[in-house]
Amino acid sequence: MGLRFFFLVVVFVFWDLEAHANSADPNSQLTQKDIFILAGQSNMAGRGGVINDVATGTQIWDGVVPSACRPNPSILRLDAKLNWVEAHEPLHADIDVASADGVGPGMAFANAVLAQEPSSFGPIGLVPCAIGGTNISQWERGSLLYRRMVRRARAAVAQQGGGGGGTLRALLWYQGESDTIVKQDAESYGRRLEKLFQDIRLDLMSPMLPIIQVALASGEGRFVDIVREAQFGTDLLNLRTVDAMGLTLRPDKLHLTTESQVRLGEMMADAFLNFIPNHLSATSNPINANFDQSTTSPTLLISNFIFSYAMIPLLTILLLITSF
Ligand SMILES: *[C@@H]1O[C@H](CO)[C@@H](O)[C@H](O)[C@H]1NC(C)=O
């Protein structure tokens, strides 16, 4: 009983904190960041400009940083030790440590958001979490990757000392190349993806969290079309899909070039900014404008609502009932 009561209190405190995060101490706005999670596999971690070094026979990054990916004092990243540092390419250098990291979409995304909406956004806090070669099963709730992503996202939002926290604005997701090898995996992709997105929103207590996902440009196997169909078929509220198909690939036919990553980052920025109605006339509190129901059926709206908003109160009631 004691434990359950404690759990209840914790749930309500967090629920309340989340609801009032924006109206807290006005001074905290100074360091309040607009936070974006970057997750998925190699093309999110960034392989743009990664080349074979003939001398050593290893893969290295060519070090070329296009102006769209240049550092900016208003763009920070959460490093592997959960400290905010000024962001620069490669964003995943201390996260996806098993491979040579290059340019991904993150810096181009952040620079584009700041360029288009300087009065609404910034500073931006990027939370890189992508790991090359990972399939969707390795990201399911409870897995190492999932738990690390949630831990990093929570740390980013809550951080008190050392740069302050902020508000979660979106999840940027680019993954699925590793699920194109076995047909059954490709066919299970849609179900696993939708579950993952719902789990993340629930665990981050952000039921309407905007998600920008990338439809595959390539794959490790031949079932790319099945995964792409699943991606376009995912019918969740506040989910946008940008299509990477047609962007230029490196000679490995799997990874986007630096130039393609810049283009992708800008496409993702456009998709994100479209969550804000009339985003050209900047709103002061963009997150309140995140409801976009234009493309969603009423039944889905209701089921999304029940799942997202009613889940925690329902669980709580269930706990209460079982306590007595
Ligand atoms: C995903 O990858 C893991 C680790 O390589 C492997 O054990 C598992 O079978 C894969 N699952 C699917 C569905 O491909």
Image: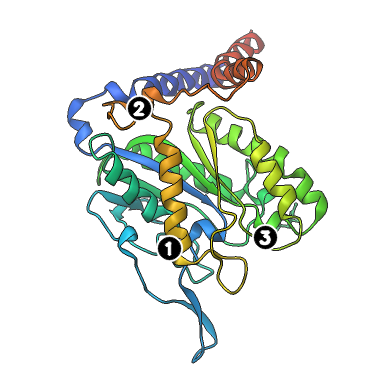
Question: Secondary structure under badge 2?
Answer: loop
Residue bearing mark 1: 94
Q: Position of residue 301 (x, y in %)?
A: 59, 18
**Residue holding disc 3:** 219
State how far apart marks 1 and 2 are (Cα).
Answer: 38 Å
The kind of residue tagged 3 is Gly
298 shown above or below 87: above
Q: How many marks?
A: 3
Badge 3: residue crowd in 10 Å (few <14, some 14–19, many ≥20): many
Residue 163's spot in the image, x, y percent?
Answer: 25, 45
Ligand 1 falls in quadrant: bottom right
Question: Image height check: is 85 above or below 288?
Answer: below
Q: Residue at 57% of width from left, 62% of height from top?
A: 132
Picture colour scheme: rainbow
Q: Position of residue 228 (x, y in %)?
A: 68, 47
Amino acid under disc 1 = Asp
The amino acid sitting under disc 2 is Asn
Residue 278's label in the rendered image is 2
Which callout, 1 or 2, points at the residue further toward the start of the chain?
A: 1
